[in-house]
Amino acid sequence: MPRLVISTVGTSLLTNQIQERNEKDWKRRINETANLPYDEVSQYYEDVSDIIKTLKHRAENKLYDDTDVAQIREASAE
């Protein structure tokens, strides 16, 4: 029987998708803007907006396409 689990998530859902060495500054940039409204981020911090879009895509792929439950659990700290 299918089960639905609802959990709150924070920035870890995005920051856990950072993998490459040239992305090491991404976590700092996301944390700096974590409490800002998305409209403000997209208007004044275009680089962060692009980072979020990239990491969102990676997270969605992991959550929707990966059948390994352990990998899915590692996607977020929660």
Image (cartoon, rainbow, N blue to C red):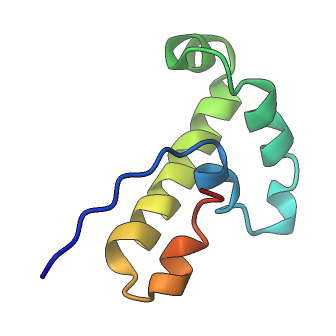
Position above or below: 17 against 68: above
Question: In the displayed image of the protein, which residue is found farthest to the left?
Answer: 1
Where in the figure is residue 39, as x and y percent of width and height? Answer: 50, 13
Position above or below: 10 against 49: below
Please report the residue visible at 22 percent of the width from the left and 71 percent of the height from the top. 3
* Image quadrant in which the N terminus is located: bottom left
* Image quadrant in which the C terminus is located: bottom right
Residue 74 is drawn in which quadrant? bottom right
Position above or below: 27 against 69: above
- Given residues 49 and 13, the one toward you in this image is 13
Where in the figure is residue 12, as x and y percent of width and height? Answer: 66, 51
Where in the figure is residue 19, as x and y percent of width and height? Answer: 74, 69
Describe residue 33's horizontal placement relative to residue 10 as left or right.
right
Where in the figure is residue 43, as x and y percent of width and height? Answer: 58, 12
Describe residue 2's horizontal placement relative to residue 43 as left or right.
left
Residue 30 is drawn in which quadrant? top right
- Given residues 68 and 45, the one toward you in this image is 68
Please report the residue visible at 34 percent of the width from the left and 77 percent of the height from the top. 65
Residue 35 is drawn in which quadrant? top right
Please report the residue visible at 87 percent of the width from the left and 46 percent of the height from the top. 25
Position above or below: 19 against 49: below
The total of numbered circles placed on residues is 0
Question: In the displayed image of the protein, which residue is found farthest to the bottom?
Answer: 68
Describe residue 71's horizontal placement relative to residue 17 as left or right.
left
